[in-house]
Amino acid sequence: MLLELNVKDIALIKKARVEFGEGLNILTGETGAGKSIVIGSIGLALGAKARGDLLREGAEEAYIELVFQTEPGSGLQEKLHSLGVAMEEDGLLIISRRIGQKRSVSKINDETVTLARLREVTSLLIDIYGQHEYQTLLDPKQHLDILDALCRRENEALFAALQEAYRSYSAAKKRLQDFSMDEESRKREMDFAAFEIGEIEAAGLREGEEQELAARYRRMSHARQIAEHLSRAYGLLSENGVSEALSEVTEAAGYDEGLSALRDQLCDAESILSEAAREVRDYGDSLEMDEAAFQETEQRLDLIRGLMAKYGGSEAAVEAYRKKKADRLLELQDYEETRKRYAAEAGEAEAALLKLCRSLSEKRRIAAEKLSEAVCRELRDLGFESVSFRAEFGEREPSPEGTDTVCFMTSLNPGEKERPLQEVASGGELSRIMLALKTVLAETDDIPTLIFDEIDTGISGRTAQKVAEKLDIISGGHQVICITHLPQIAAMADRHFVIQKETREGRNETEIRPLSGENSLSELTRLLGGARITEAVLQNAREMKELAQKEKKMHKEARKKKDEL
C-alpha cells in the first residue's frame, strides 16, 4: 500500500507530506484548494507526462516521492521481482521523480529508470480512477479486459494455453504462407539454395580453421619484425653472465658447504637460459618467408571470412545455414507433399486454437452472467432503481485473446431499451458504473491501492450514502484514497485529510493536514452546512459519523465471517 506522499514545488504546493493508512483515506477541501494537484502529483510520480508550468513559480525543479509497503512473499512482490525490481528487506519500495524545466529523472529505489519502465512497475501498485479513467468505459475494447479480470484467476491455465496455441497457429500459418509459390518462384529458390549449398560445401570448412589461419597469417605477415626481436633476444641470452657467476660460486662452495644450494640454483638457471637461447635461435631460423604459402594462407582466410560474413559469424554458423538450406531444398523438391503437410499442420493448429477459444468463450459467458447480476445489484444500491446491464458477445478472427468481442449494454431508466454503454451514460453515471464494477471485481483485483477522484459527481442524499458504503467495502481488501466533497463519504474515513489554501508572504500555498476527532467533525459540518454552522448541523455531523462507524463495523464483521467460511 501507499505509506507516504512527499511533494515539493508543484503548482501551489511548496512542501507537503502525507502519511496514508490502511482502509479508506479521504481527502476533502474547498473548491480550488488544490485537491486536483494532489492527485496530479501522484500521477506524475507514476509516469504521467510532465509540463513545465507545473513547477511552482520561482522553483527550478519539482520533486514527488511515493513510499510503498509490500508484503514479503506476496504475489505483488513476486511480480515486482519478475520485473527486476530490487526490494528492500523491509518490503519498502520508493518511487521518486524530479522534474525540471527541460527534463525529468525517475527512480525506483534509487535506480534511475525510463518512464516506460516506471509505468510498467507502478501499474502493479496503483490504479487511479478519475474522469479520464471513467471515459475508458466508453471504449468497447476495454470491456473484454474488465470481463476477463473476473474470470482470469480461475482460468489462468486456459488463458496460458490459448496464448501458446495462438503462437503455434501463427507459426504454422506463416510457414504455410511462406511455402505458397508458383512454379517459377519455386525453381528460382531451388537454384539459389543449390548455389549457396554448393558454395559452402566446396569451401570444406572445419571448425576453428579461421582462428588458426588468422594466427598463421599474422605471424607470416610480421616475420621480419619477429626475426629481429628474436635475434636481439638471442644475443642478450648468449651474453648473460650466469656461467661466470656459476664458476665463481662453485669455487667458493669448495670452502663453504653453505653455498651448495646457491650453486645448484645457478646451475639450473644456466641450463634453462641455454635451452631458451637454443629455442629462440631455432624459432628465428624457421621464419624463412614463403611467398606462395603466404598468398595461399591469405586467400584461404579471405574465403572463410567471406563465407562467415555472408552466412554466419563462425564456421558452425555457416554449417548450420548450409543444413537449413539443404532441408529447404528437399522441401522444395518435394513441393506438393511438403505443402500438404504444412496445410495439415496449420489446420490442426487452428482446430486446437478454436477449441480453446470456444472453451474460453463458455467461461466468459458464465462470468458475464455473474457480472451482470452483480453489477445490476450494485447499481440498484447506487440509485438506479430500474437498471439492466449485460455483456453482449460478438465474434472476430482468432487472436491471443480468443475470438470474442464484448460490448456492455445497459438501460439505466425505466422504459429505455438496452443500448451500448457509450451511447447511454453521462459522466456522473459513468462514475457510479465504474464504482459498481470495482465493487464486484474487488476480490479479484490484485492492485493494492485504488484512488478515486470525482466519484461523487452528480450524486447526493441516499445515493451518496450508498457510494460511501461501496467505497468502504472495497477498502476491506484494498487501500482506497478518495477525494470528495460529500459528507456521507467523508464520514466513512479511516483517515481523513483536509486540503487547504493559505496565503503566506503574499503567495498562496496548498497544505494537507490529517484530521481526527473534533477536527474531522468540524470538516464534516463544513461539508454539511456551508458558511454558517449551527448546532443542528453539528448534531447532524455527529449522527452521520456515528452511523458511518456502525456501518463500517458491520462491513468488517461481514468480511470476517466470509473469511472464516
Image (cartoon, grey):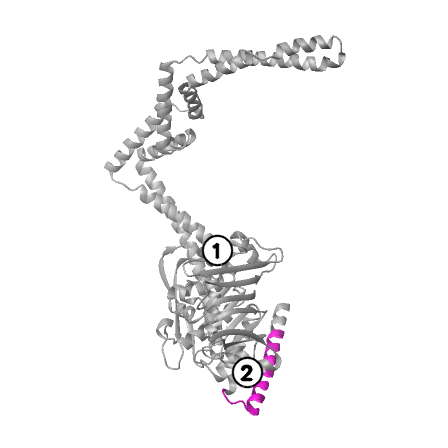
Residue 436 seen anywhere in this rendered image of the structure: no
Q: Position of residue 338 (x, y in %)?
A: 34, 38
Vertical side of 227 occupied by 121: above or below: below
Mark 2 Cα shell of 10 Å, populated few (<14), some (14-19), many (≥20): many
Taking depth in this image into account, of 181 and 503 the one nearest to the observer is: 503
Residue 395 seen anywhere in this rendered image of the structure: yes
Taking depth in this image into account, of 170 and 60 the one nearest to the observer is: 60
Taking depth in this image into account, of 434 and 378 the one nearest to the observer is: 434
Vertical side of 452 occupied by 211: above or below: above
Q: Position of residue 487 (x, y in %)?
A: 52, 82
User: In the image, which residues are magenta?
Assistant: 530-557
| Three-letter residue code for mark 1 | Leu
Residue found at the far left of this picture: 184
Residue 38 badge: none
Could you tell me which residue is drawn at 61 percent across and 74 percent down?
556
- For label 2, the residue is 524
Residue 540 painted magenta = yes
Taking depth in this image into account, of 536 and 439 the one nearest to the observer is: 536
Q: Position of residue 90 (x, y in %)?
A: 62, 58
Name the image quarter holding residue 183: top left
